[in-house]
Image (tube, rainbow, N blue to C red):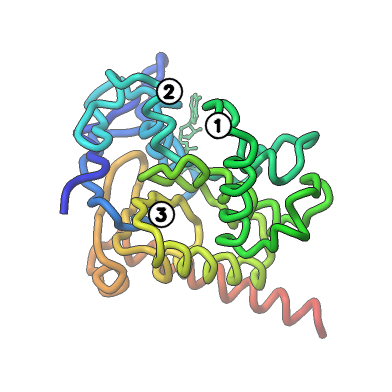
Amino acid sequence: MSAAIEFRDVSLATREGRHILNGVSFTIEEGTVTAILGRSGSGKTTLLRTVNRLIVPTGGDVLVRGHSAADADLIALRRGIGYVIQETGLFPHFTVERNVGLVLEVEGRARAERSERSHELLSAVGLEPGTYSRRYPHQLSGGQRQRVGLARALAADPPILLMDEPFGALDPLTRAEMQDMLRTLLGRIHETVLLVTHDLDEALYLADRIVLLHEGRLVVQLSPDEFVHSAQPEVQAYIRAFHRGERNRGERNAETRS
Ligand SMILES: Nc1ncnc2c1ncn2[C@@H]1O[C@H](COP(=O)(O)OP(=O)(O)OP(=O)(O)O)[C@@H](O)[C@H]1O
């Protein structure tokens, strides 16, 4: 296997001297799914955004498929990286089909080709093209909008997919459906995925490797099995806190029902 993304001693300091990322080094192999976990403010989103150069590190380097993101042609770099965020960023006045095919439109591809690719991708994310392609984003549920966001991110067939809490705003049932859909989809396409999530179960279900960040530093990069059995104090603290949160949510739901 070869490296799709390599973080080499990546640091980010603000002008005021605050260290948001601190010497982060690890490698992501091609075709694998890596989940980034860590408490709020630990630097997950910041690290993700160094890959498509929305953020430029103040120290170290990010290599994308062997080339420094800092030196890459920005358009070519981003064409090779799909980006899915919680808010989806769909254009409200464009139909679903046009939203999905937008990158191809920018590339000047013919309408018939764009339409065919949009339909193919909508089917792949579980939206029947005949029903959904002519709709506008406001005519969709949150989960359906997320599916369109994912289809759009895949339109140019990028080898790398960055996902920043893509299912964070969804109810637990819809989230589980989306996780199933993504897992099935990733089983079919050879994609390198970097997924920021607050959900340990989501990371365990989807990822080949789990990265834990703490105050801008890499704590561990482990397989899901190694992660749940890790003796690292930060990993254990994270797992305990996650399960306590789950229990509290369960108790609150039970109280609301009674
Ligand atoms: N543009 C910015 N300028 C200065 N500080 C920033 C900027 N963006 C983020 N930060 C700070 O960097 C730190 C890391 O933020 P980041 O969004 O990467 O964390 P996160 O782990 O993704 O958090 P969350 O889980 O809450 O989304 C935080 O302390 C945040 O306040």
Q: In this picture, is 255 found above or below 28? A: below
Q: Which residue is mark 3?
A: 37
Left or right of 179 on screen, residue 63: left
Q: Position of residue 10 (x, y in %)?
A: 26, 31
Earlier-in-chain disc, 3 versus 1? 3
Earlier-in-chain disc, 2 versus 1? 2
Rendered image quadrant of residue 20? top left
Quarter holding the C terminus is bottom right
- Label 3 to label 1, Cα distance in Å? 38 Å
Q: Amino acid at mark 3?
A: Leu
Q: Is mark 3 within 8 Å of ligand 1?
A: no
User: What residue is drawn where x is 73% and y is 82%?
Assistant: 254
User: What residue is drawn where x is 39% and y is 69%?
Assistant: 204
Mark number, residue 75: 2
Q: Nearer the viewer, residue 43 or 191?
A: 191
Q: Amino acid at mark 1?
A: Arg
Residue positioned most to the top: 15
Q: Position of residue 112 (x, y in %)?
A: 63, 41
Q: Nearer the viewer, residue 257 or 132?
A: 132
Q: Rate crowding at label 2 as few (under 14), some (14 to 19) or many (20 or more) other CA atoms within 10 Å.
A: few
- Label 3 to label 2, Cα distance in Å? 29 Å
Earlier-in-chain disc, 3 versus 2? 3
Q: Which residue is mark 1?
A: 109
